[in-house]
Image: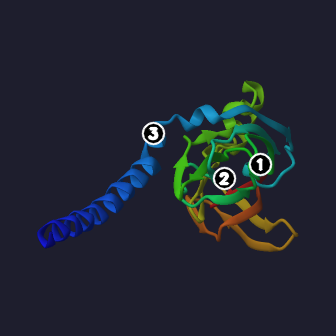
Amino acid sequence: MLKNLLYAIACSLILMMVLPCQQTFAQERDNSFPLSDFDFDSLLKDIVYHYDLNLNAGDPDFICEGFLTLSLDVPEGTEEIYFRRTPRPNRRIFNVIPISCNGESNLNISIDRVFANTFFKVTFFINGKGYTTSTYDVNTFISPEDLEILQSVSSVGEMVVKSPVIEMQSQSISIKCTSELNVSIHTLDGRTIYYNTIDKDTEISISPGIYILNAQNSDTSLSKKVIIR
């Protein structure tokens, strides 16, 4: 009798140890499967970029400004949604905008002050884990004609104006010339930060910002808004 009682107690203890382990394993498995294989890009729909061009903007990055609208299908159990954007493809730091889902199965969202060259993605948090879509380029939603304008204005390369060649580089302006050239550089509020007459290749160190460069001689008269990064 005692032997049977001890045997029953031992079996009960074994069951108490095994069952919680099985339950924990099931919970962990449910948290990671099958969402890890799910195509979250399929949840983003009707992406539209509404924009205007402002060719008078000082910085090419702000010549195109608008707002982005899209529709999101929300998976069951979603706790949080984050819209992430960055102004440059090589940046790893994203501006994060939380989106309230409130148990809705579908959301229509609008993000304002979206500029050209913006990259964005969406992260869904489900059961404490984050699942992120691919990264989208807002430029793919700009018309080819407007995109061509943006690219021509944004290109910082070599300008040839009769004799002198002017190049904007990182924190400097390089001027190549074979005759005398009067060069002045001004801030947007009119302050003169550089003035000199040069007659050979010259490199001018300058802090990052937006400036007006004037270059003049008997053959050339140039006034150009330049951007130093």
- Left or right? Give the position of 200 relative to 181: left
Which residue matches tag 1? 114
**Closer to the eye: label 1 or 2:** 2
Task: Kindly identify the residue that appears in the image at 76 percent across and 26 percent down.
Answer: 145
Crowdedness near tag 1: few (<14), some (14–19) or many (≥20) residues, C-alpha within 10 Å: many
| Foreground residue among 102 and 120 | 102
Task: Judge depth for marks 2 and 3 and give the one in front.
Answer: 3
10 Å neighbourhood of mark 2: few (<14), some, or many (≥20)?
Answer: many
Secondary structure under badge 2?
Answer: strand
Nearest to viewer (mark 1 / mark 3): 3
Q: How far is mark 1 from mark 2, CA to CA?
A: 19 Å
In this rendered view, identify the residue nearer to me: 163 or 81.
Answer: 81
Q: Is there any visible trace of residue 125 in the rendered image? A: yes
Among the 4 quarters of the image, the one containing residue 189: bottom right
Q: Do labels 1 and 3 touch, CB within 8 Å?
A: no
**Residue 125 place in picture, x, y as percent:** 58, 54
Q: Determine which residue is flagged by label 2.
A: 81
**SS class, disc 3:** loop
Counting from the top left corner in percent of width and height, residue 62 is at 78, 51
Question: Looking at numbered disc 3 in the image, what kind of residue is underneath it?
Answer: Pro
Which element carries disc 1, helix, strand or loop? strand
Tell me how far mark 2 sits from mark 3, CA to CA: 19 Å
Q: Three-letter amino acid code at disc 1?
A: Val
Residue 187 pos. (x, y %)? 80, 68
Report which residue position mark 3 lands on. 34
* Residue type at the position of mark 2: Ile
Q: Is residue 5 above or below residue 146?
A: below
| Left or right: 210, with 36 as reference point | right
- Give the mark nearest the N terminus, 1 or 3: 3
Tell me if residue 217 can be seen: no
Q: Earlier along the polypeptide chain: callout 1 or callout 2?
A: 2
Residue reaching furthest to the left = 3
